[in-house]
Amino acid sequence: MDSSIIFLLAFVALMGLMFVFLFATARRRDAERALDDAPTIEERAEAATAHLPVPVGHASASGRELERSVALQRRGGAQVATPEAPPAPLPAPLDEEALGVTRRQVLNRGIVATFALTLTGFGTACVAMLWPSLSGGFGSKIRVGKLDEIMEEIADKKEPFYLAAGRLYINPYPTEDAEKAKKITAYSAVLEGYEAGVVALYQKCVHLGCRVPWCKTSQWFECPCHGSQYNRVGEKKGGPAPRGLDRFAASVEGGVVIVDTKTVIPGPPIGTNTTGQESEGPHCIGATSEH
């Protein structure tokens, strides 16, 4: 599994544990507050032994009073009236904190919300960094531009079309040489672009990763770091490079050049020369002996 995926799963698990911890802490504090507000055993005992009035509608006479009332009634006397209970006292006013959310609950929930927002923002930033760009940049399919305009610019300036966002060069590939390219195994993934007359080359030298500039006089790519040289379509011509320039799959759809930079395709082996293009002038960099 990719290390970025492992990191993302670990972060999600950590964030979930943090939420559970904060929620449990808030519930425990609320429970402690409820226990603090509950009456103690002594207070309940005092309430039980106190002379509380009997609520209205629930008054009752003792057994002795009932016997006395019956005896007087048999003798023709008046019945003893059942004592009426005094009216129930008015309830005591409730504490303002008991009517709504307590200050402690507000504080706890505010802390939880702050942590949640912070972790969410951090998680979003991490996902944005780890998740590959879906359009317009390196690691995605890029709409470079109209083929006619790109080729016209290359012809006028006599240099490749460079796209910084894709870290690539666009150069023309002779369509008549596409048949030769079909015989090269390394070109199997890029033949569609060659048949459309386009080659998309990665800007890095395959020797030590320097960015390879274009030499206008020789009409080759020439690396200033160690003198590796490549022809117009990125096939190695000299220097210590172990192969030709790496490249990307390109296509032309509706007259627009599209390059897939998600996958870097290794360059062709030493000795590949499908176009036969030789140096057209003085070199910008003196090439070292070819390996």
Image (cartoon, helix red, strand yellow):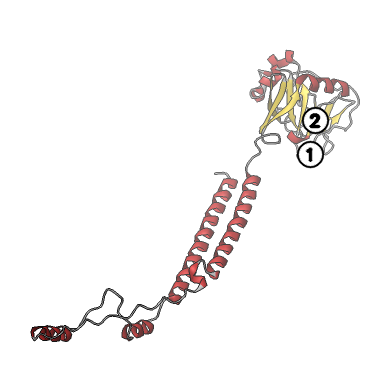
Residue at the image position 65 percent from the left and 49 percent from the top? 125
Q: Marks 2 and 1: CB-CB under 8 Å?
A: no
Tell me where residue 101 appears, x and y as whole percent: 51, 66
Q: Nearer the viewer, mark 2 or mark 1?
A: 2
Residue 45, image quadrant? bottom left
Left or right relative to 232: residue 248: left
Tell me where residue 24 appears, x and y as whole percent: 48, 64
Tell me where residue 248 appears, x and y as whole percent: 69, 29
Q: Secondary structure at mark 2?
A: strand
Q: Nearer the viewer, residue 117 or 126?
A: 117
The CA distance from mark 2 to mark 1 is 16 Å
Q: Which amino acid is tagged 1?
A: Cys
> Is residue 221 among the parts visible in the rendering?
yes
Considering every residue shown, the one lying at the far left of the view is 74
Tell me where residue 14 appears, x and y as whole percent: 54, 56
Work out whether 56 lies above or below 17: below
Q: Which mark is residue 210?
A: 1
* Mark 2 / mark 1, whichever is N-terminal: 2
| Residue assigned mark 2 | 162
Left or right relative to 151: residue 50: left
Q: Which mark is residue 151?
A: none
Q: Which amino acid is tagged 2?
A: Tyr
Q: Nearer the viewer, residue 218 or 127?
A: 127
Image quadrant where one finds the N terminus: top right
Residue at the image position 49 percent from the left and 74 percent from the top? 95
Q: Secondary structure at mark 1?
A: loop
Work out whether 139 lies above or below 108: above
Residue 266, image quadrant? top right
Report crowding for label 2: few under 14, some 14 to 19, many 20 or more residues within 10 A (C-alpha): some
Image quadrant where one finds the C terminus: top right
Q: Nearer the viewer, residue 85 or 235?
A: 85
